[in-house]
Amino acid sequence: MTAEPTPRLHPSSPSGDAPPSASPGYSRVRARWRRPAGRAVVSIVTSLTLLTVAGCGLRLETPPPTEPVPDAQETLRRDAVDGALLVGELAVAAGATSSGLDATSLATLAEAGTFADLHVTQLGGVYDSGLPEPDGDTDEPPSGATEQPTTPTTATPAEVLDALAASSASMREGIDQTDDGPFARLLTSIVSSQDASARQLAASTGTPLPESLALPTGLLVPETTPSGLTATDLSTIIEAEDAAGYAFEVRAALADGDVRAAALDRAVLHRARAEAWAQAAGTAGGAQDPRRVAYSVPADVPTAELAVQLESSLAESYAALTAEAGTGTRPPLADLSTEASLAAVAWGAPLAAFPGLPEQSTTPPAAG
């Protein structure tokens, strides 16, 4: 059974019927719409007129648009932005108002402020809905909005360190909570950057480092492989750790003093991590074990420079793995990325706004 076409309103007739095409079906529909007596037609026209006249009133009664309520991901992003903003504001205030700071400390504060600005930008900046400000004064922020603190005018290095520690801790939690892998990778990089800035600031000003920024130590390799990682991911990181251990062994044998001791310590640690990853992956000693007897080590690169390259490469690898791993299993990977990044700094690498992110390796302009 075929349903009859639904009539459409058109201004050319009292019924509003628009002639789509000449057909018997259309004639029947049009006749049906013309069938009502004059009273019914007047009623329809009157109703339409009333609606038209009242239209403005109906629109005025519609509530104005409101601030959307942020979802879990947006909340994580805003929290990260707020933390980075506070770090930057305090760093600028401390550099301007703290007395007795030497040039190194002032430069560290300025760099921390510059990095914070870059972090805010990469995190997406401060949220702006584009909605007009509400009329009248109100102490209540719009629905879904976070109230921004007053910009500090004075600060101390200790306050900057506390802000770095708090922001780093918050973002570290976000790494494991977000469902967005690339966002987890970005947070991992920012955490590493904030940790390095905090250590340099603490060292240059003689201010105690907050306990939450204790340097990650030990193997840090989980006993079970993080979810989401493939066999290729595991094979790659096993070989990378083993190759780094081998390179440090070669350089330790050719060096003496502090360089020899430092290279040997890293050699032992990287070899142990390679073994731990192979055990976790279930490939240790088997046909799928990617480790080799020897690796190529460049002879024309100074030991410190080679160490920076090795540790920075591992920081990149672990940051990339945080993007692949599932929630609930990312913290060890993030800690390993931070540890490798800090090791690179210890070997002479400059502080960076985004360690572990090669696409963000452009050196920022000097602050001030």
Image: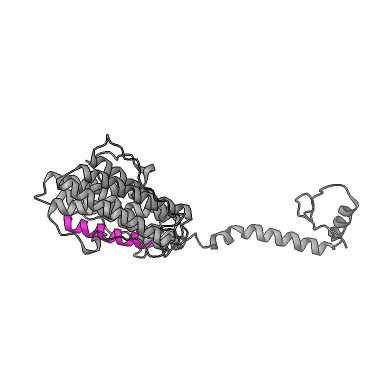
Magenta span dominant secondary structure = helix
Horizontally, residue 311 falls left or right of residue 110, namely right
Q: Residue reaching furthest right?
A: 24
Horizontally, residue 144 falls left or right of residue 270, namely right
Q: Of residues 175 and 299, which is closer to you in this image?
A: 299
Question: How many numbered callouts?
Answer: 0
Report whether residue 282 is seen: yes
Report whether residue 349 is seen: no
Colour convention of the picture: one colour
Question: Residue 37: image x %, image y %?
Answer: 85, 63
Whether residue 199 is situated above or below residue 107 in the rendered picture: below
Question: Residue 104: image x %, image y %?
Answer: 15, 45
Question: Residue 96: image x %, image y %?
Answer: 16, 48
The residue stretch that appears in magenta: 156-174
| Image quadrant where one finds the C terminus | top left
Locate residue 57: give its quadrant: bottom right
Q: Of residues 124 and 286, which is closer to you in this image?
A: 286
| Image quadrant where one finds the N terminus | bottom right
Locate residue 285: give its quadrant: bottom left
Q: Of residues 155 and 365, which is closer to you in this image?
A: 365
Q: Residue reaching furthest top?
A: 300
Question: Residue 312: image x %, image y %?
Answer: 31, 46
Residue shown at 24% from the left, 59% from the top: 215
Horizontally, residue 324 falls left or right of residue 365, namely right
Residue shown at 32% from the left, 52% from the top: 190
Residue 226 in magenta stretch: no
Residue 173 in magenta stretch: yes
Residue shown at 27% from the left, 51% from the top: 267
